[in-house]
Image (tube, rainbow, N blue to C red):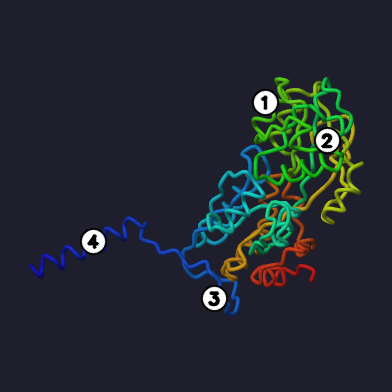
Amino acid sequence: MNRAATIFGTLVVLVSASACGGRQDAPTADSGGDVTCEVGADTRVSIATGNATGVYFSLGNAYAEQVSDATNGTVKATAAETGASVQNIQQLVSGTYQVAFSLADTAADAVEGKGSFDGKAEPVQALARIYPNYTQVIVRNDAGITSIADMRGKRVSTGSPGSGTEVIANRLLESAGLNPATDVSAQRLDLTKTVDGMKDGSIDALFWSGGLPTPGITDLFTASRDDVSFLDITPELPTMQEISEVYEEGVIPAATYGLPADASTIVVPNLLLVRDDLDANLACVLTKTLFERQPQLAEVVGAAKGIQLEEARETDPVPLNRGAELALEQLGGAS
């Protein structure tokens, strides 16, 4: 009986190890010790991105691949489709993801306990400032919309629920004197459904915040070039800057979507976020990979050309993770 029990116990251990793939994930909690920028055991990292036809998603998948490759699989990274910024931060804090893409204005709201995070400051930090997002507001030419104020009574896609696009869309509508809940017929849709609605005429205008080019927007202009146009939203910039200093004026080059002229717009930086208790060594590895593999990322996703080491530390009011600080120091980023 004793021998049988021993054999049975051994089998249970072997089966359990097999069920776990024979690997033990390294802890991701920060020990508070010295940062060596080394991860000594197998670690799994899940990255929160955005809509499937947006830049967050395509860049997130490319970044996950580069992280896994750069660490020879020691850090196994995967990317997941999400609703984007607000949802990403909520699920980052809950532990569903270890890394998250976010617009800087939404991230600032999170650490200050404002906006969608009213009354509760969230424990998030930044790995780096990355490329800028361009607010892309597009209208159907037959909708009679020449300003945001003209959206009153129109069918307007304000983006996925819980997205940074929705935050910006609502702020722009309010800046123009409109109540997003009552003055427009808000269609809270992801980009794929939004583009379909613009094509078939069931949506009059869309808001989208994304890198250049955004695949879904490219699809819209390819299919409906003569039916849609960019709307100049820069008249609302002064009011938007009263809400957050992160908003800046920018230009969408005509060549981005094969248009006859540049389009003026409002630009918001993106941040790569982690929880404030993420292991600093893991944060260091993730940050170094982002910049060391930037050329490979840019080959896959055009927006990654905007990931610049000299701007990496510009994350205020979101603090930099201490592991990211060491990575940027080693890489030579400006302090």
Residue 12 shows which numbered tag? 4
Q: Nearer the viewer, residue 36 or 104?
A: 104
Mark 2 residue element: helix
Closer to viewer: mark 2 or mark 1: 1
Residue 196 shows which numbered tag? 1
Q: Nearer the viewer, residue 8 or 59?
A: 8
Q: Position of residue 255 (x, y in %)?
A: 83, 35
Q: Amino acid at mark 3?
A: Ser
Asked if 103 appears above or below 201 in the picture, the reply is below
Q: Position of residue 243 (x, y in %)?
A: 83, 53
The numbered mark, 2 or 1, whose residue comes first in the sequence reads: 1
Q: Few, some or many C-alpha atoms within 10 Å of disc 2 (few <14, some 14-19, many ≥20)?
A: few
**Looking at the rendering, in which quadrant would you find the C terminus?**
bottom right
Number of numbered tags placed on the structure image = 4
The numbered mark, 3 or 1, whose residue comes first in the sequence reads: 3
- Whole-number angstrom distance, CA of label 1 to CA of label 4: 53 Å
Looking at the image, which residue is at 66% across and 34% down? 189
Q: Position of residue 163 (x, y in %)?
A: 67, 45
Q: Position of residue 167 (x, y in %)?
A: 73, 46
Looking at the image, which residue is at 23% across and 61% down? 12
